[in-house]
Image: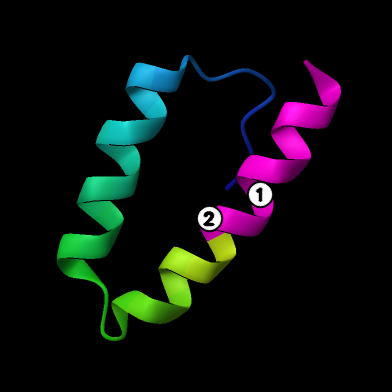
Amino acid sequence: MRFEELPYESFERLQALLLRHAEDPRVIAEELSDRLGFLGESA
């Protein structure tokens, strides 16, 4: 899934949802952390 734009508040909700249902939350947390850095560069 790819989002072109996502308000930070929505990102927080999406992150919580993914972490809650992930088989291994650490993998998701690392991926989101990497993506958040990427999103910050484009803003």
- Which residue: 31% across, 85% down? 24
Indicate whether 27 appears above or below 42. below
Q: Is residue 36 magenta?
A: yes
Identify the residue at horizontal 63%, vertical 17% (top origin): 5
* Image position of 38 (left or right of 33): right
Query: Which color mode does the image show?
Result: rainbow
How many numbered circles does the render carry? Answer: 2
* Identity of the residue furthest to the bottom in this view: 24
Residue drawn where x is 57% and y is 65% of the image: 31
- Front residue (pair 37, 27): 37
Q: Position of residue 25 (x, y in %)?
A: 30, 75
Most common secondary structure along the magenta stretch? helix
Q: Nearer the viewer, residue 20 or 36?
A: 36
Badge 2 is on which residue?
A: 32
Q: Which residues are magenta?
A: 32-43
Disc 2: CA contacts within 10 A as few (<14), some (14-19) or many (>=20): some
Secondary structure beneath disc 1?
Answer: helix
- In the rendering, at what x and y percent does residue 11 appear? 41, 31
Secondary structure under the numbered disc 2 in the rendered image = helix
Q: Quadrant of residue 12?
A: top left
**As shown in the figure, which amino acid type bears the numbered disc 2?**
Leu
Q: Is residue 7 left or right of residue 41?
A: left
Mark 1, other Cα within 10 Å: few <14 / some 14–19 / many ≥20: few
Image position of 1 (left or right of 40): left
Badge number at residue 35:
1
Indicate the quadrant where residue 18 lies.
Answer: bottom left
Residue 39 location, x and y as percent?
71, 32
Q: Are marks 1 and 2 in contact (CB under 8 Å)?
A: yes
